Image (cartoon, grey):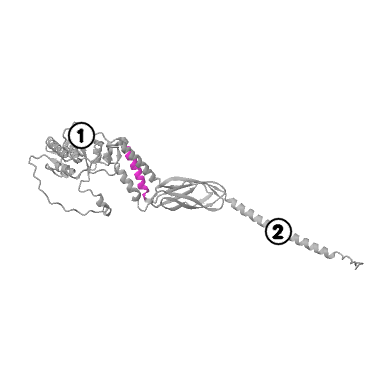
Amino acid sequence: MRGRRSRAPRPTPTPSATPTPRATTDPASLPLDELLAIGGTPADVHWPDPGAVDAATVAALSADGGASLVPSTVTREGESGATVAPRAEGALVYDQHASTLLSAAAALDDEATRDATLAAARASIWLAAGDAGGEVLVALERPGGVDARDDSLDRDPSPRPADAVADAVEAATSFATRPLSALLGDEPAAVEIGGAGPDEARAAAVNELHGRENRLNELGSMLSDPTLLTAQARAEALQLHGVAWSTHLDAWEGAVAAEQQSLTALGDAVSIVPPSDVQLLSAEAPLPVWVRNDLPYPVTVTLHAQPDNPRVAVQPVAQVEAAPSQNTRVRIPVEAGIGNGQVRIALSLQSPTGVAVGAPQSIDVTVRADWERAAVVVLAVLVVGLAVLGTIRTVRRRRRRAGEEAAASERPEAPRTEDPRG
């Protein structure tokens, strides 16, 4: 909002007709570009955290022609409360005292208290405009989603009273005004930006969040719709950049820690289940590998297998369609090669775009493929031996029977005797 000092009396407002209520629109039916539209505000105006802005911040944001909105108290000229020119090099400077009064009035439900605060705000704007050569810039402070009572995140903060906001805007615009774009075109005044600058610990935490968020963006190709994985994480990360957190650092640190854990869990949601050692006793066998997917969506990954010596031949690549919220079994064909011994097979997953997924694993395979051949030979020898032994026993039995019959036929017949009592 802009205000220019005017000596003309304040015009009497003319009542306007009551507007016809507009039909409400379901936000879910709106296209994304309409949901993200914020009106005609210049895209190159930035509003950094007033408690963390400094000359380096302003210089960085103005490198591409942008301008930073900063309070007068972060300038060397305004540290003591003096009025500062609204246009500086790379910055738009709003009067801190007048803006604080307007913001306080915009949050008051009590009409009498609000009117008194608005009167003080108008007086502050009038005086500041006179000190700054006829023009002053004011801004309504941004309410945040933090409950100041217990430093906890308030997901449904109470909005400012609509009539209070309207009164604050009316008070600010009761002076002569001009567009913000016109102020951006003014020649910058000699204003030196001071300020405390960003907190290094907070900056490091934000950078770490960005790193984990970028990791999710890289893994998004696993899903048919990457936004299912990345959209919520992006929205939560942006919420943690809110200016209201700057006065509730304990709550912010807790929220950041929770978000880091959430992003880590999402980044590690797909991986190979640590396998057990395997004994390969045959020339060919499938190697069982399990792929874990903790996401509620199906994913597509590529499983790579690489043995460390030629004792076994392994299918090097297998595409896996991992079902949601479960472990999916993958069978990798393995063929025994030369000799027996120990083989370690390295296992890894990749997304369709070649990004490593989860931690690599390895499986130790003990090759004993000759046991199968030896077992077949031994079994064959046993079968042949049993057959030969049975044949020998049958031949011997028949020969013994034939000899007994021949001996019986050559034996003389004993004489017959009659019973004298006959």
Can residue 88 be seen at all in this image of the molecule? no
Q: In this view, does 111 lie to the left or right of 268?
A: left
Picture coordinates of residue 248, whole percent (x, y): 29, 37
Quarter residue 191 falls in: top left
- Image location (x, y in percent) of residue 366: 55, 47
Q: If the image is split into quadrants, where does the C terminus sit?
A: bottom right
Determine which residue is flagged by label 1: 73
Q: How far apart are marks 2 and 1 (CA)?
A: 111 Å
Q: Please state the extent of the stretch shown in magenta in the rendering.
A: 203-220
Q: Which amino acid does label 2 sit on?
A: Gly
Residue nearest the observer in this picture, 155 or 324 = 155
Asked if residue 228 lies left or right of residue 177, the reply is: right
Horizontal side of 289 relative to 252 (left or right) equals right
Q: Residue 390 carries which label?
A: 2
Label drawn at residue 331: none
Residue 36 among those drawn in magenta: no
Residue 364: x, y in percent? 52, 46
Comparing 15 with 286, the one in front is 15
Residue lying at the far left in this picture: please name it: 8
Q: Evaluate if marks 2 and 1 touch, with contact meaning CB atoms under 8 Å apart.
A: no
Q: Considering the numbered disc 1 on the image, is that residue within a helix, a strand or a loop?
A: helix
**Magenta part mainly helix, strand or loop?**
helix
Q: Residue 161 appears at what percent x and percent y?
A: 20, 44
Please identify the residue farthest to the right as the structure is shown.
420
State the residue lying farthest toward the top. 80
Q: Quadrant of residue 47?
A: top left
Quarter of the picture holding the N terminus: top left
Q: Is residue 215 magenta?
A: yes
Identify the secondary structure beneath mark 2: helix
